[in-house]
Image (cartoon, rainbow, N blue to C red):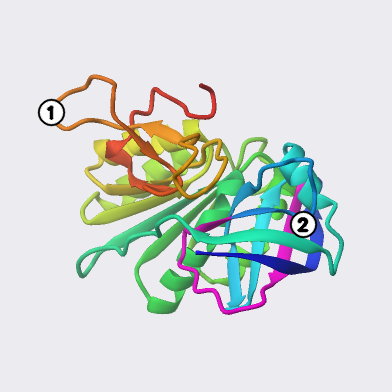
Amino acid sequence: MIETIATADSNRELAPGYRLLTLDLKEDVPVRAGQFAMLKPHASLEPLLRRALAVYRVHSPRRISFLYQVLGRGTEALARVENGGAVEALLPLGNSWPDAIGANQRVIVVAGGIGSASVFMLCEKLASTGVDTQLLFGARSEPTAIGCGLEDFRALGLPLTLTTDDGSLGEQGFVTGALERELLRSGRPRSTIYACGPWVMMKRVAEIAVQFEARCFVSLEAPMGCGFGVCVGCVVAVKTRGTNEYGSYKRVCTDGSIFPAESIRWEVDPIAH
């Protein structure tokens, strides 16, 4: 983990409310698929805290991109960063996507909305290694899909099923419906699911994984102050072995952000509480 001042090479809008920020770093930073960074405009007092963003692409050890949705003060401030602007960066943070285990393993990647940012590097790796992979990409509408990097995912050449809530692009419906159909079609065995998206989507993905006896890993988002385990603002309720009672929590920043889906207490949304 390093703390540095990076330079914005570009910060362009992909679709209304969705942007791609590319940073040039002063030193080599090794980043693994699924890791994230804490970012804010340099010398900005508002907001005070950095914003956690998944690393979207690594172009070189000193050049990385972040795909993000402009939702609050932190991302609004980042959206105002101009080319050549300075950005405070703390990275890389968190764990990474585990490898699918065993020969003949099938992989299904579920990208929901801006959760696509966390799985793009994973898809790059899967596309390069020839693992049997199905990509399920869900968004609210065509502009949302474009803003969430759809064209980058298409360029990887992975088999792709696209769903939109309003039917403006791809199939109309939720991406979880496509997941159920894919598991029914493939006949269940030896599937590993990787998912990132809204909490309610991943809750349903976790339920489907149990139903079809598939391994499932999810990347979680939670309110985060520091990003390295001190503030404990990002805890998520997890199951305690041997009991269904509450009382066990893990930090999304240092214990995750990627967890086995079966370990999470999905009825406790860390964003809503």
Q: Is residue 15 magenta?
A: no
Label 2, on which residue?
Answer: 42
| Residue at (22% x, 56% y) in the render | 190
**Amino acid bearing label 2:** His
Look at the numbered disc 2 and give the secondary structure of its residue.
Answer: loop
Question: In x, y percent, where is residue 16?
Answer: 81, 46
Label 1, on which residue?
Answer: 242
Question: In x, y percent, where is residue 27?
Answer: 61, 78
Mark nearer the N terminus (2 vs 1): 2
Relative horizontal placement of residue 167, taking residue 9 as reference (left or right): left
Label 1, residues with CA under 10 Å away: few <14, some 14-19, many ≥20: few
C-alpha span from label 2 to label 1: 47 Å
Tell which of 238 and 118 is nearer to you.
238
Tell which of 181 and 124 is nearer to you.
124
Tell which of 257 and 12 is nearer to you.
257
| Residue at (79% x, 63% y) in the render | 86
| Residue at (39% x, 64% y) in the render | 133
Q: Quadrant of residue 90?
A: bottom right
Q: Nearer the viewer, mark 2 or mark 1?
A: 2
Tell which of 28 and 98 is nearer to you.
28
| Residue at (12% x, 28% y) in the render | 242
Relative horizontal placement of residue 248, taking residue 11 as reference (left or right): left
Question: In x, y percent, where is residue 96?
Answer: 40, 60
Does residue 1 lie above or below 139 as drawn?
below
**Amino acid bearing label 1:** Gly
The region drawn magenta spans: 17-37
